[in-house]
Image: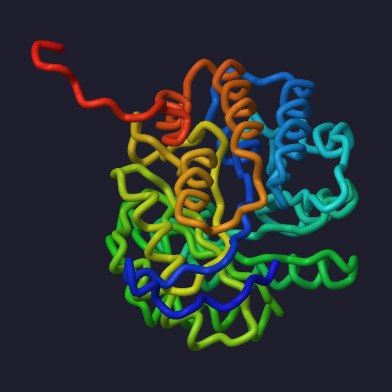
Amino acid sequence: MPHPIAPPPDPRTGLALPAGVTICEVGPRDGLQMEKTFIPTAAKVALIDGLSATGIGEIQATSFVHPSAVPQMADAEEVISGIARRPGVRYTALVPNERGAARAVAAGVDAIDLVVSATDSHCLANTRMTTDQAMQRARGVARLGAEANVEVRVGFATALGCPFEGFPPYERVERLVGAAVETLGARHVNIADTVGMADPQRVHGFMRRLIGTFAGVTFSLHLHDTRGMGLANVLAGLEAGVTNFDASIAGLGGCPYAPGASGNISSEDCVHMLEAMGVRTGIDLGALLAEGARAKALVGHADSALLEAGPARALGPYRAPVAGEA
């Protein structure tokens, strides 16, 4: 969804912020896929329906992968058919290949998310092929989407940091984005900090150059908070001109290469920060917090500051402690 061009920096703060952003909720897919206990389909559907009512414009509902690869997503068709579609909400799904894309199209998703690792090592670990080989395979997905009139959005995992190779050079990422635009016809490209290695300077530099190079392409950021820099990286992306961000309810998710570490940025923490800065999300924070509590109860854990502390404005008027008080 397009948003107004970011205004000049606010002279009071020095920040150049857009009027509004689009949040894509990835919790039902990225947040749940690492849960070892299978979550009942009805519970997944109820969570998605609840999220749909918060004002979120996009929800990545599931992934059409082979059940042996990601058992938690074995009910992809049932989830898509079971949700109560709300007008104005786009329901998308991740696919790994043509077979998954064909299943997603048949299920009736609004858009297909195709992810290719930006580094060969990560791509080989996930798909047993190099990045260039994966880009060749992606042509079939793009062709299938075009024939079905379903948008195919291309994402690049590890574009901002790889657990095997370190930090990919900007030139490599730009080449991959160029191939996605020119060869695959992508008009929406997602840049991912898959394992939470990026810092604000890297995010700002990469995104400012990509946005300046590829006019007419919508860029989104998929950020992880593995090392505590998730929201700082959101701010860096905002200043670079990004107005589309992925986030996960209750901060669910994780990283297989950093066991025990936090994963995706929390949707409620992100919305709280944006709205506090005057950046509109269109999301009802109270309703989102209720869904965060539902998600936490569903899986038994969460990684969300807001679920623990509540919104800043919900606190009463500040009173300085009286001498002798703890």
* 120 left or right, relative to 91: left
Q: Residue furthest left?
A: 324
Above or below — where is 140 with respect to 96? below
Q: For the C terminus, which image quadrant?
A: top left
Quadrant assignment, res 41: top right
Q: Position of residue 300 (x, y in %)?
A: 52, 15
- Between residues 279 and 149, which one lies in front from this camera angle? 279
Q: Position of residue 187 (x, y in %)?
A: 68, 76
Q: Position of residue 1 (x, y in %)?
A: 70, 66
Quadrant assignment, res 114: bottom right
- Between residues 101 and 306, which one lies in front from this camera angle? 306
Above or below — where is 153 with respect to 169? above
Report the residue at 78% width, 66% height from top.
151
Report the residue at 38% width, 35% height from top.
262
* 239 left or right, relative to 27: left
Quadrant assignment, res 243: bottom right
